[in-house]
Amino acid sequence: MSLETITKIEKRHYTGKVYNLEVEPNDSVEDDQYYVNANNGLVVHNCHPRDNIALSWLAKELDLGYDLFAAISHSREQQTRNMALFIADICRQEGKPCVINGRAYKPAVPYTVGSPSVLLGGYLKEMGIDVSYADSETGDIPEGEQDCVCVMAHDPQTTYDHTGKKYEQKLYFNLRAGCTVIDPWRCFEDKRYKVIYYGLS
């Protein structure tokens, strides 16, 4: 990448929809559309963290001198570890295992590479917590009623809001009434469970 190429990129204020980029331009899957600037060919999207992984690799390949994307990934890892500490405390207090509701990196896909759920589960296992997943897309289907601490890893409304449709945040498995549900998205509501919204109010 030359300095001349870099200086041709202009900074502009943008108002409008931002889409994910994952599938090829002519793919029939409609939940991963994207926006391409017709003037410069730049793709605008919000696919995270898979893009950070790819861009971090590219920064090293091009020897850019500083890998901003690795720094973002490190921040993400620390935030996930902090959440794992919070969840682990609740699991220990209640003497229950943890089921992460959603293993794929986003709802309704089978892909787990770069998934924050897998990262969270890894930290919880390091902390001595018994962890499993519930996600039919990845083949994780707990049998029977589960007595556990549940973590809501997916929120389809946040992920697919750009479609203009309404999506329900739901459990992918049968959770026993009275169990604790930890929701970092802060939108799950069900009076059968003790719901804890993770993060600041």
Image: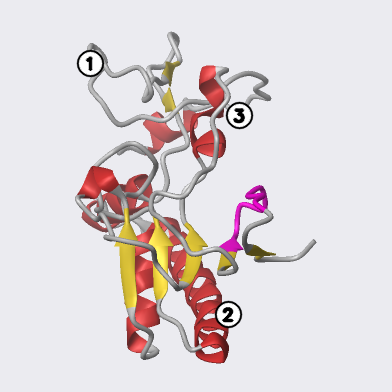
Q: Is mark 1 in CB contact (under 8 Å) with mark 2?
A: no
* Left or right: 200, with 88 as reference point: right
User: What range is drawn magenta here?
Assistant: 182-190
Give the residue type at disc 3.
Answer: Lys
Task: Reply above or below: 141 against 84.
Answer: above
Q: Residue at x 35, y 17 (%)?
A: 30
Q: Magenta: predominant secondary structure element?
A: loop
Q: Is residue 24 magenta?
A: no
The answer for how far apart the CA atoms under marks 1 and 2 are is 40 Å
* Left or right: 176, with 60 as reference point: right
The answer for how far apart the CA atoms under marks 2 and 3 are is 39 Å
Give the residue type at disc 2.
Answer: Phe
> Which image quarter: residue 123?
bottom left
Q: Is mark 2 in CB contact (under 8 Å) with mark 3?
A: no
| Residue 130 horizontal/vertical position (percent) | 34, 82
Q: Nearer the viewer, mark 1 or mark 2?
A: 2
On residue 172, which mark appears? Answer: none
Mark 1 residue crowding within 10 angstroms, few (<14) / some (14–19) / many (20+): few
Q: Nearer the viewer, residue 54 or 95?
A: 95
Mark 3 residue crowding within 10 angstroms, few (<14) / some (14–19) / many (20+): few
Query: Is tag 2's residue or tag 3's residue first in the polypeptide sequence?
Result: 3
Query: Is tag 1's residue or tag 3's residue first in the polypeptide sequence?
Result: 3
Q: Which residue is mark 1?
A: 27
Secondary structure under badge 2? helix
Task: Reply above or below: 108 against 112.
Answer: above
